[in-house]
Image (tube, coloured by chain):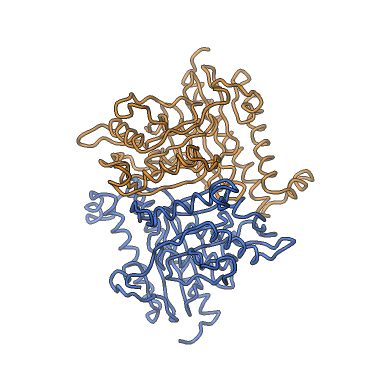
Chain colours: A blue, B orange
Amino acid sequence: MADISGEELDEIYAFAVNLGEEAGRMLMHGARVRMGDERVANEQEEHVQKENAVDLVTKMDDDVEAFIRGQIANKYPSHKFVGEESYSKGASRDYLIDDNPTWCVDPLDGTVNYIHLFPLFCVSIAFIHHSKPLIGVINAPLLNYFFSSCAGRGAYLNRTQRLPLIRNPIPPLPANAPSGCIFSCEWGKDRRDVPEGNLHKKVESFVNMAAEVGARAGRGGMVHGVRSLGSATLDLAFVAMGAFDIWWEGGCWEWDVAAGIAILQEAGGLVTTANPPGDYATAPIEDARLGSRLYLAIRPAGASATETGRQAQERTVREVWRRVRNLDYSRPGG
Amino acid sequence: MADISGEELDEIYAFAVNLGEEAGRMLMHGARVRMGDERVANEQEEHVQKENAVDLVTKMDDDVEAFIRGQIANKYPSHKFVGEESYSKGASRDYLIDDNPTWCVDPLDGTVNYIHLFPLFCVSIAFIHHSKPLIGVINAPLLNYFFSSCAGRGAYLNRTQRLPLIRNPIPPLPANAPSGCIFSCEWGKDRRDVPEGNLHKKVESFVNMAAEVGARAGRGGMVHGVRSLGSATLDLAFVAMGAFDIWWEGGCWEWDVAAGIAILQEAGGLVTTANPPGDYATAPIEDARLGSRLYLAIRPAGASATETGRQAQERTVREVWRRVRNLDYSRPGG
């Protein structure tokens, strides 16, 4: 596959932004129908409205994915499409992202939030080439937050607000990170109550990050705050804003993170693996592989008198690795 | 003190809404100065800007409280004023709220979020009479969410959207609550790593609520999601929206919750104590006392075929009490 020119990329970016707007309007319509603000458009919807919120949201998920997939197939028939549905249908044990131009889409991230109309839900659209997320669009319509980025063109909130929010200069990471940091994490769906299960490994890691310095055999991180929003993509967007310093999570699929990673990397953030390597203090810090299901993200960081932003990000990665457990998430059969 | 007429209450409500708008603008100005979007107004501010974010936010907290206190003293000189500052100065062991007309104000709730420019921060203004929060105003300016309520006049998001969001009819609580519920909680500032400290009691409670049904000696609650935002007042506002089903927290002061409680109660929610009584299955469920520092809030709930909304709320309170530990928060000397 040939490279994509700057002009082509601009065109794809404009198309992705437009798709994000349209899909966001669909999500908002569904929300407004449930709030009784908008009449349902036809009898079929009226029927659906009588079903419970979970069925309604499943239908919305399907409708928005079908819409986005159709628009892409029409405009860029040679591009690949990866979404939740394609995975469950394909059931491949392989990584889904390859060198081809690929759209990786979550029509509705933060599904539980959408069911409850907690505003932290969004549509998430990424364009990937040569396995690199080049374009990210995240539209959280009930929040009125629209994140977008394109490689080399900057990351933005609501079109005009460059990310991270504070950038003249970008603040350095705290010298004693994770102390002073906002730590974002998610409880996830794996709630098995077994000693070496993901729930207990996550909670042990959260408590290490939260506990006072010196506690827990030197693992106490005394983070400034622990936050859980219920949307991986929005967690990443808030890291790109600089609002969260650290996000650590396992279990996400490609479509849960692709757009968020595009935006965060374009803003200057770092994304690597959640699971600490054995030699966590010295191991090279590599970009997370899209599809690994294990992610640790650090916000964009400015230089201090003693280190570069990248050095501070790597220092923070190692301080997190020192405090967290290895999570058990793999690809089916992988 | 004489009763307040409906006309007087309307006037006080309009005044409180206006105060919330002005104070929100001050918080946004501070945020925009840090983002480099707005010039600082004078040399003093320029000096402050060179200090670190924490000092800057402390100054903002003081400035907004002084502004609100001054406006109230000017308009209603006979009314009491209760804020963070009044507590640290007074150091009384008594409850601060009595029968007098009282303003209870947090100029900046979600301070840690404001320091990091995570948008979940707000100004929170309550008007209380005969110990009842009658008016609540919460302005989260970077979120563009403005919550307001007045006793008997409804609770609103952004002036026109009545709360809870879904209300024709208001959905019942799940039959197997807390399963199916969004559970909101906060890690707080007490991070001591001691077995019977608040950190460990909170985490044990969180894990009980999250774990699969049947786990943890029957305490597994399998909630739909666990959320932590870092602002007690906004947690309560999201319960009033119906977005969170349950909020459980200890350690808050009057000003952290007064406006949120006003809005939640006006929307039809229930607020009682976080700490389970010994006879949690049968104990009467009383409204939380403002100042108790221990809160459990349940969202507005519609009736089902088998129970009223209030019955479902009380059932949910008991299911939470069955799963949580008693927290150690008291008033100084109390």
- In this rendering, the answer to whether B187 lies above or below A144 is above
Q: Quadrant of the C terminus of chain B?
A: top right
Question: How far across and how far down the image is residue B318, in percent?
Answer: 32, 33
Question: How far across and how far down the image is residue A160, in percent?
Answer: 58, 60
- In this rendering, the answer to whether A159 lies above or below A103 is above
Farthest left residue in view: B305
- In this rendering, the answer to whether A249 lies above or below B257 is below
At 32% across and 75% down in the image, what residue appears?
A92
Question: How far across and how far down the image is residue A120, in percent?
Answer: 44, 52
State which quadrant residue B124 falls in. Answer: top right
Nearest to the observer: residue B190 or residue A129: B190
At 49% across and 51% down in the image, what residue appears?
A206
**Residue A227 vs residue B169: left or right?**
right
- In this rendering, the answer to whether A121 lies above or below B240 is below
Question: How far across and how far down the image is residue A218, in percent?
Answer: 58, 52
Nearest to the observer: residue B78 or residue B117: B117
